Image (cartoon, rainbow, N blue to C red):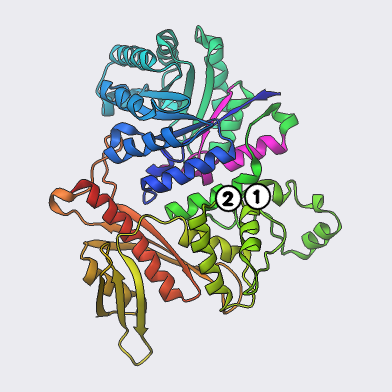
Amino acid sequence: MDKVRIFDTTLRDGEQSPGATMHTDEKLEIARQLARLGVDVIEAGFPASSPGDLDAVQRIAREVQGPVICGLARCVERDVTAAWEAVREAERQRIHVFIATSDIHLEHKLRMTREQVISAARDMVALARSLCADIEFSPEDAGRSDPEFMYRVLEEAIKSGATTLNIPDTVGYVTPDEYYGMIAEIRRNVPGVENVIISTHCHNDLGMAVANSLAGVRAGARQIECTINGLGERAGNAALEEIVMAIHTRSQYYGVTTSINTTQLYPASRMVSNYTGMAVQANKAIVGANAFAHEAGIHQDGILKNRLTYEIMNAQTVGVPESTLVLGKHSGRHAFADRLDQMGYVLDTDQLNRAFTRFKEIADKKKYVAEADIEAIISDEVYQPQEIYHLEQLQITSGDHAIPTATVCLRTPDGSLLTDSAHGAGPVDAVYKAINRIVGVPNELVEFAVKAVTEGIDAVGEVTVRIEAKENGENGLPTNPQTGTKTRVFSGHGAATDIIVASGRAYMNALNKLLAVKQKLS
């Protein structure tokens, strides 16, 4: 079978989701997981957008082996040189150059003529090719572009050295039949197209990103651009896990294969969800909590007799273990480490020690620790930003005839302890106000979500928060040159059997991200 390349853009397009901003260490961990997953290309960021993005792409290029490491660039010389500077140390490098080709973008965004667009595409692809052998070119908003004009731009890109042509449905406008036709017509009408790879990049505004991408494969595309959990701007991108499992499950229909290790899909999904604070809906295909769950009696009866009656995939194929993990306070480090390995987590000694300590704390409070508890421990204890302030102690007083009061103690980077108290509308509000009195960073809580990750009154609770940074003079956050928006929303995640403690940890997690960015800018 032909192979379809999987081009993951979680760290670039995915991070452009409002509130999904990640710091460098988180990006690096996700890139390593993507390498374990077996993606062919990692679009690690948009280096010209900020010094932080440039640094993140450089670290990924230096430290992640296996996939091609790609940097995005507009058809602007500064962008192209920044992209090359970011990826040049990678084992395999790619520069991805794009410019809009639809009339609505030319008139209202670029304010350029068609000839100017052709010239810019030709010159910047040539510049990129002089730096790097692997060049991808995208005519942004291809789905609404005049076909004849787009063919001309694509022809010039090939002549200038492009090795991959990506055809973006940037606003999720076209239907699967239309997208199939667009790819087929490009293959018929663009000279030299037989010497390059055609790629898909579909957005989900009308809920057809996956269907459009697969239609593109049927028409001859051999690279798919997608993201973990379908993360991306507005309604998101084509979901990598859905694309891969559609090809895996219906390989005879599509006649293609991928290099993806499907057992790493679920761990990748959980990692991205935890880092971005973007929860995966329960009925999400492949990786949702209900994807392999059955409640209806007829379904349960069929599953017990033969799983094929109601399941077209095996849960273990995507990395979801069928059995419930049963570990308790008598379990040892070896059993804990072995189960983490089965779940797809790769931890160093220090991370394992921290996670095992938290596991024993929870095991002392519960009859048994379930797999979902373990995932909550990992996301809370291991995948966290470098702490600037550490929540050392938290105490609250609350009740129906009491004024909610919280006392918190934070450890500073120099090891000293700061303590303060505050009243609030409720215990969580009091905790956050007490923390704010110590930290003193202006912000607004824009989202607060709580869920139990296991059943029972002793369940571990997960809290996800998003805070919006308030502009603060010179240290305001930078503007993204592509979107023109401020990167000001930070997510935080916390887990504990005490939901107030989990809330405090989640808030500190978000605040530490905000403070880390502010320190870089000051």
Q: Position of residue 474 (x, y in %)?
A: 13, 48
In the figure, 47 relative to 267: above or below?
above
Identity, as a three-letter code, of the amino acid under mark 1: Gly
The residue furthest bottom is 401
Instruction: Give how far across and how far down residue 13 sits, in percent.
Output: 42, 38
| Coordinates of residue 204 in the picture (x, y in percent) | 49, 40
Q: Going 46% across and 62% down the picture, which residue do you hit?
A: 380
Left or right: residue 320 versus residue 31 is right
Answer whether residue 207 is visible to the viewer in this image: no
Question: Is there CB contact under 8 Å for labels 2 and 1?
Answer: yes
Residue at far right of view: 305
Residue 506: quarter of image? bottom left
Looking at the image, tell me whether mark 2 or mark 1 is earlier in sequence order: 2
Q: Secondary structure at mark 2?
A: helix
Q: Which residue is mark 1?
A: 319
Q: Amino acid at mark 2?
A: Pro
At a point 81% along the width and 51% down the height, the residue shown is 309
As drawn, 432 above or below 202: below
In the picture of the structure, the residue carrying the numbered disc 2 is: 267
Q: Is residue 154 above or below residue 431?
A: above
Query: Residue at the spot x=21%, y=57% of the render?
Result: 470
Residue range highlighted in magenta: 221-250
Asked if 340 appears above or below 435 in the picture, the reply is: above
- SS of the residue under disc 1: loop
